[in-house]
């Protein structure tokens, strides 16, 4: 049976993100020979790096480490960060827990231990996934993985996750079964999607090569920057201004995945495929959104089902949730 705890690469040895610099300079068959004593400031542990990069028993690194170099330096950095994140069950669980917490996208020192926390913080800062000015002695830090989803690395990331699953004892299905479904289901079971700050639907969209916005949103949604800033001026029928991922997550943590207008719950009706699925509606009228502003995810957003969401946006004058609730009540 697959066991996530089998992913337990030592993360107490510092500087492991520096492997990205070596990958940019060497083909995969030369990487492990150049990680210590060759470049100034790069002295890495071979067994640690081999495990992070999913080396085969014969010492060969996967082909995707050659392929990703063609996508550019930023893509190498991004894929290395994904490989690090999914190399230890503590990191996977810490990131997944942060996605579902009341204070989303924050890692705490106490959850990882001092050395692991400090080394992770260095890697996150180097990769541009958290504030560069965070002191190493801080007890927690916020992060943003959304830049990973603007990189052309989804197919390589899928291969990374495949190798990590194999290390847990997961066995690919026989030729008569669907490999994609089996891989996806096991990733969801291990909460790989939550570790990346994605819903299971967004995670599958990303793994299958379809577009996931830089902030983790689906293609029909407008990307908004960090700090809950809202206000893009484009209009489509649903799923526009609401989807800053941190604001959305905070809203759902508060309200849950039940529609706040008709009480529809996707998981209750559809089972597993409906788990953690809901739209999030912006309560402010579109006429108010002419400039950017800071959003309160509790007072400005509510979870709604797609049907209610469409009804809220059906007319040029935005229908309020209370009006729609009364409409449903009067039509019963």
Image (spheres, rainbow, N blue to C red):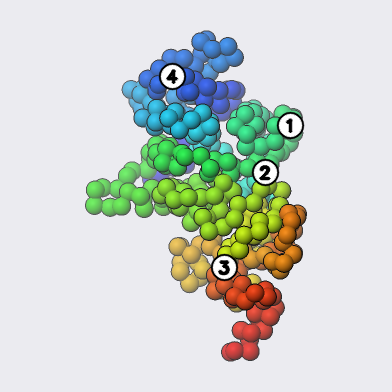
Mark closer to the chain start, 4 or 3: 4
Mark closer to the chain start, 1 or 3: 1
**Crowding at label 2, few (<14), some or many (≥20) Cα neighbours within 10 Å?**
some
Residue 310 - label:
none
| Rendered image quadrant of residue 56 | top left
Q: Secondary structure at mark 1?
A: loop
Tell me the distance, in whole angstroms, between the alpha carbons under discs 3 and 2.
Answer: 33 Å
Tell me the distance, in whole angstroms, between the alpha carbons under discs 1 and 4.
Answer: 31 Å
Residue 149's spot in the image, x, y percent? Answer: 53, 44
Q: What residue is shown with label 3?
A: 237
Residue 23's spot in the image, x, y percent? Answer: 47, 23
Q: Nearer the viewer, mark 4 or mark 2?
A: 4
Above or below: residue 201 compared with residue 43: below
Tell me the distance, in whole angstroms, between the alpha carbons under discs 1 and 3.
Answer: 40 Å
Q: Residue at x 59, y 71 (%)?
A: 309
Q: In the image shown, does 21 or 187 lie closer to the viewer?
A: 21
Q: Is residue 99 visible?
A: yes
Q: What residue is shown with label 1?
A: 133
Mark closer to the chain start, 4 or 2: 4
Residue 26 - label:
4
Above or below: residue 270 compared with residue 97: below
Q: What residue is shown with label 2?
A: 106
Mark closer to the chain start, 1 or 4: 4
The reply, left or right, for residue 240 in relation to residue 52 is right
Q: Nearer the viewer, mark 1 or mark 3?
A: 3
Q: Secondary structure at mark 4?
A: loop
Q: Residue at x 55, y 15 (%)?
A: 43
| Rendered image quadrant of residue 114 | top right
Please state, as top left, top right, bottom left or bottom right, where the N terminus lies in the image.
top left
């Amino acid at each position: 049976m697959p066991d996530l705890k089998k992913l337990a690469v030592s993360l107490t040895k510092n500087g492991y993100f520096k492997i990205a610099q070596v990958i940019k300079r060497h083909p995969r068959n030369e990487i492990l020979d150049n990680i210590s004593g060759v470049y100034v400031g790069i002295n890495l542990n071979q067994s640690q790096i081999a495990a992070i990069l999913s080396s085969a028993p014969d010492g060969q690194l996967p082909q995707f480490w050659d392929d990703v170099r063609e996508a550019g330096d930023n893509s190498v950095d991004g894929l290395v960060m994904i490989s690090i994140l999914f190399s230890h069950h503590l990191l996977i669980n810490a990131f997944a827990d942060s996605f579902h917490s009341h204070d989303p996208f924050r890692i705490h020192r106490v959850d990882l231990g001092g050395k692991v926390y400090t080394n992770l913080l260095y890697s996150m800062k180097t990769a541009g996934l958290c504030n560069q000015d965070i002191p190493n002695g801080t007890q927690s830090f916020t992060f943003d993985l959304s830049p990973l989803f603007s990189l052309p690395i989804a197919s390589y990331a899928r291969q990374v996750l495949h190798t990590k699953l194999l290390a847990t004892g997961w066995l690919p299905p026989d030729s008569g079964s669907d490999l994609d479904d089996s891989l996806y289901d096991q990733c969801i079971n291990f909460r790989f999607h939550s570790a990346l700050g994605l819903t299971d639907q967004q995670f599958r969209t990303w793994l299958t090569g379809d577009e996931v916005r830089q902030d983790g949103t689906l293609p029909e949604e407008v990307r908004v920057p960090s700090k809950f800033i809202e206000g893009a001026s484009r209009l489509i029928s649903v799923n526009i201004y609401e989807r800053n991922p941190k604001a959305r997550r905070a809203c759902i943590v508060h309200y849950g995945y039940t529609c706040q207008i008709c009480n529809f719950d996707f998981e209750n009706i559809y089972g597993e495929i409906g788990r953690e699925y809901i739209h999030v509606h912006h309560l402010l009228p579109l006429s108010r959104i002419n400039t950017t502003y800071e959003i309160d995810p509790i007072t400005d957003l509510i979870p709604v089902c797609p049907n209610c969401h469409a009804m809220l946006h059906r007319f040029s004058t935005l229908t309020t949730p209370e009006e729609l609730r009364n409409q449903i009540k009067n039509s019963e």
